[in-house]
Image (cartoon, rainbow, N blue to C red):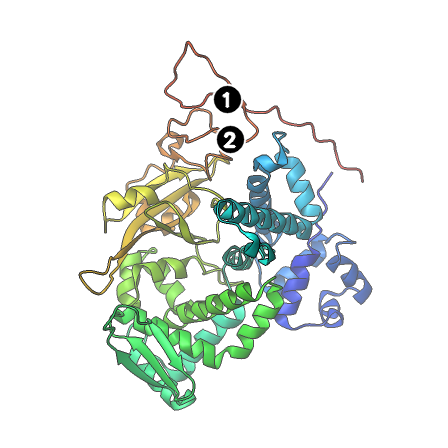
């Protein structure tokens, strides 16, 4: 029996992004308003005919519309349910897919609840030895990690924010900003349109800001230590705050974030998104990326931006009707903490705990500045072309430590012909791919010699007379029998 598609939440979000009423959309889709209302509330499934009309109207890829977000939710939910909090019993993948498909909003709320628990647990542990009577009135946990909540917002937008992306591209075209040499154009535009003057300031004591805006005098102060790409980015960020304020506030309101901290972080994130879209406008950047087969260093030169900025922008090229190669983008510090992560692919990052040690982002620190290429395969069988390279953010003085990160960028091996980094890789050889996973806690590979600890829910095998090269021997749980859903 064919699976029924209940995707009302996605259709409602698309309708709201286009500013359409239910009545207007119903007329375009050739259905009654009451029928559309039932679809949006998941009381009726989508038919093939309506799906095709939706695809034409919104210029979307049906495969992405139907599957991508559900797959991400299933992966995130599976990892969260691996927490010992939920016991050792494993919920089968089919059951998770059924639950997520039936109620995606419920799945998101379970994830939010687990994140709230994680935050409370970590803070209580850190304060356990210092709590006193004065602390009893303080709040230990909010509804969710603010940064995680905002990351989820971009994650489920497929890391593409249409209103800001299109506004940035129109501004570049209208003002004829020079691609690859935009800094002076941005300074002039801030003065002419917003009466803002830009001043470079020296950081004498090491505690200054990269960017500081004084609305009283209309002055934007930029640190003289910033590189040219960073200056252009901060100028574009200020343009977003001044020229796209209403759009940003509307998007923040529609995000339904649970705290003021999360809303503030989201405003910064949206302004950063606009800045990236301004210095690397969609169509020009996507066309150049295809021409050079997504060679990051060539794109750096063409648009006068940093390695990290190019990689981040490549992960956002998911405009309906003009989608680019879907990439993931990640930034990792030397301790393995993921400080930035975005994915337009089926590649999933660890939300809690460390990433897979076999992933080449960790190896990058041993060869600073060199682009490393890896053919990797996730447990679901999907192979990825992964590149990694370190970037260094200078402290600006001998006694100020520099910060070093590893930037990871990757796409599915199916796009090998469109990516220059596939040169020399044996894409057709399954054994040539490095077997990686999301994290040890949820990875079910039984033969990994790099495993840090066994996965949650596994049955350990301990033999005092036998020592294996594999640190933990365990068996996978038996797959659950999933009954066919009642019609």
Q: In percent of the image, x 45 and y 67: which residue is there?
A: 273
Q: Residues within 10 Å of mark 2 (few under 14, many from 20)?
A: many
Q: Which residue is mark 2?
A: 455
In this rendering, position of residue 377 left or right of residue 252: left
Does residue 182 appear anywhere in the picture?
A: no
Residue that sits furthest to the front in the current view: 133
Labelled pair 1, 2 in contact (Cβ < 8 Å): yes
Measured Cα–Cα span from mark 1 to mark 2: 9 Å
Give the number of marks.
2
Q: Residues within 10 Å of mark 1 (few under 14, many from 20)?
A: some
Q: Find numbered disc 1 in the image and state the secondary structure of the residue it sits on.
A: strand
Does residue 476 appear anywhere in the picture?
A: yes
Tell which circle, 1 or 2, labels the residue nearer the N-terminal end: 2
Residue that sits furthest to the left in the current view: 398
Residue 99 appears at what percent x and percent y? 69, 43
| Dot label at residue 294 | none
- Does residue 472 sit above or below 125 in this rendering? above
Residue 17 appears at what percent x and percent y? 61, 69
Q: Find numbered disc 2 in the image and state the secondary structure of the residue it sits on.
A: loop
Q: Which residue is mark 1?
A: 474
| Quarter of the picture holding the N terminus | top right
Q: In percent of the image, x 55 and y 78: which residue is there?
A: 246
- The residue lying toward the viewer, choosing from 382 and 83, is 83
| Quarter of the picture holding the C terminus | top right
- The residue lying toward the viewer, choosing from 425 and 417, is 425
Residue 301 appears at what percent x and percent y? 26, 65
């Amino acid at each position: 029996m064919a699976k029924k598609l209940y995707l009302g939440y996605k259709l409602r979000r698309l309708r709201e992004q286009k500013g359409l009423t239910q009545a207007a959309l119903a007329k375009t889709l050739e259905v009654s308003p009451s029928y559309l209302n039932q679809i949006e509330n998941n009381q009726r499934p989508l038919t093939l005919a309506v799906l095709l009309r939706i695809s034409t109207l919104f210029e979307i890829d049906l495969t992405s519309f139907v599957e991508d977000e559900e797959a991400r939710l299933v992966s995130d939910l599976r990892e969260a349910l691996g927490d010992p909090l939920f016991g050792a019993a494993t919920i089968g993948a089919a059951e998770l897919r059924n639950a997520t498909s039936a109620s995606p909003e419920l799945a998101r709320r379970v994830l939010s609840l687990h994140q709230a628990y994680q935050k409370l647990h970590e803070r209580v542990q850190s304060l356990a030895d210092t709590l006193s009577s004065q602390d009893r009135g303080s709040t230990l946990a909010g509804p969710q990690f603010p940064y995680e909540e905002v990351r989820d917002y971009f994650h489920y937008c497929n890391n593409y924010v249409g209103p800001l992306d299109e506004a940035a591209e129109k501004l570049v075209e209208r003002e004829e900003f020079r691609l690859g040499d935009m800094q002076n154009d941005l300074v002039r535009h801030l003065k002419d349109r917003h009466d803002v003057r830009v001043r470079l300031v020296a950081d004498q004591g090491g505690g200054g800001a990269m960017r500081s805006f004084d609305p009283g005098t209309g002055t934007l102060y930029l640190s003289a230590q910033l590189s040219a790409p960073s200056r252009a980015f901060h100028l574009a960020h200020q343009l977003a705050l001044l020229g796209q304020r209403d759009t940003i506030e509307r998007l923040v309101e529609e995000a339904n974030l649970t705290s003021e901290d999360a809303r503030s972080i989201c405003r910064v994130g949206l302004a950063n998104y606009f800045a990236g879209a301004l210095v690397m406008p969609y169509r020009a950047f996507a066309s150049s990326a295809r021409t050079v087969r997504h060679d990051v260093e060539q794109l750096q030169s063409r648009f006068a931006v940093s390695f990290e900025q190019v990689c981040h922008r490549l992960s956002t090229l998911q405009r309906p009707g003009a989608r680019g190669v879907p990439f993931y983008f990640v930034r990792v510090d030397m301790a393995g903490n993921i400080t930035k992560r975005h994915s337009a692919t089926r590649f999933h990052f660890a939300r809690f705990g460390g990433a897979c040690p076999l992933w080449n982002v960790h190896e990058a620190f041993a060869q600073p500045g060199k682009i490393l290429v890896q053919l990797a395969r996730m447990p679901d069988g999907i192979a990825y072309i992964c590149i990694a390279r370190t970037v260094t953010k200078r402290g600006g003085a001998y006694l100020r430590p520099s910060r070093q990160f590893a930037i990871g960028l990757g796409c599915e091996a199916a796009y090998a012909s469109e990516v220059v980094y596939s040169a020399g890789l044996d894409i057709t050889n399954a054994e040539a791919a490095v077997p990686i996973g999301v994290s040890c806690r949820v990875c079910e590979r039984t033969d990994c010699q790099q495993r840090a600890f066994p996965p949650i829910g596994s049955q350990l095998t301990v033999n005092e007379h036998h020592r294996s090269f594999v640190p933990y021997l365990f068996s996978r749980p038996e797959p659950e029998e999933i009954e066919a859903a009642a019609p």
